[in-house]
Amino acid sequence: MARTLKNHDTRLNNLLDIVQTLFMEKGYENATISDVLERAGIAKGTLYHYFKSKEDMLDRLIDRLSKRIMERMDAIMKQPGINAIERLNLLLRENRSIKIGQGALLAFILKTLYSDSNIVLRHKLARKTAELQVPLFSEIIAQGNREGLFHVGNVGETAVLLAEMIIGFSEPLIPLFLDLPRKKENAGIIRRSYGAMTEAVIRILGAAPSSIVLVDDADTSRFIDLFSRKAQE
């Protein structure tokens, strides 16, 4: 049974690699189930054993990226000998690093999700992201309270607020990224927005000024460069 599950997961990952390549080559809207069947060399019945639809393929691609991010996040949460601010900054930095490292995939996913036809999937991703983030934020806030680094009265509710606030903050920023480089002035708006969001998080947690870095200047420049290049392709 274990071997069967392992074989299924291996085949699923192989198929996801093919799907990812096709989607990024042709675009999500232009790629077809027939394209996947032809590239994978399998029958339609076999494909539907792994995916219900093309939307399900995209959903699985996003899930795979999210899982990779969460595996790295879990390792940081288990890391001993660091305080809450160090742990939070490590989480944020690692999250940025993974996304920059998977830049082509990230740009494709966001461009696809922010089309009008995929609004339902976009909101589904937002809810899923919040569900993953809240337990991490709760644990870090509780640690920060114990260490006197944070001053939060309601840990659980504040964790939910932070997750929802960060997701909501990202919503208007994504179109600004996707519109680069047609509107170069977007870069300045993005930088100022990150600064404002960072200040808000610090105040909500009652942390020391400048102690938390949501996105540093170097990574902001990398994201801007990434989306500027992708927008031209």
Image (spheres, helix red, strand yellow):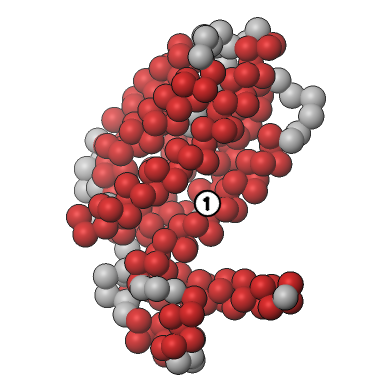
- The residue under label 1 is which amino acid type? Ser
Instruction: Return the residue found at the far right.
Output: 81
Compared to residue 35, the image places residue 156 above or below, namely above
* Residue 174 drawn at (x, y percent): 31, 43
Res 37 → quadrant:
bottom left
- Say which residue appears at 45% left-offset and 43% top-offset: 129
Quarter of the rendering occupied by the N terminus:
bottom right
Q: What is the total number of numbered labels drawn onto the structure image?
A: 1
**Is 23 positioned to the left or the right of 85 in the image?**
left
Quarter of the rendering occupied by the C terminus:
bottom left
Res 192 → quadrant:
top left
Q: Residues within 10 Å of mark 1 (few under 14, many from 20)?
A: some
Compared to residue 169, the image places residue 110 above or below, namely below
Is residue 181 at least partly visible in the picture?
A: no
Is residue 4 at least partly visible in the picture?
A: yes
* Residue 35 drawn at (x, y percent): 37, 84
Compared to residue 73, the image places residue 150 above or below, namely above
**Is 28 positioned to the left or the right of 6 in the image?**
left
- Say which residue appears at 45% left-offset and 27% top-offset: 160
Q: Which residue is mark 1?
A: 66
- Say which residue appears at 69% left-offset and 78% top-offset: 4
Q: Nearer the viewer, residue 6 or 61?
A: 6
Instruction: Return the residue found at the far front.
Output: 1
* Residue 193 drawn at (x, y percent): 34, 27
- Say which residue appears at 38% left-offset and 36% top-offset: 167
* Residue 54 drawn at (x, y percent): 35, 72
Q: Assign a secondary structure to mark 1.
A: helix
Q: Nearer the viewer, residue 133 or 200?
A: 133
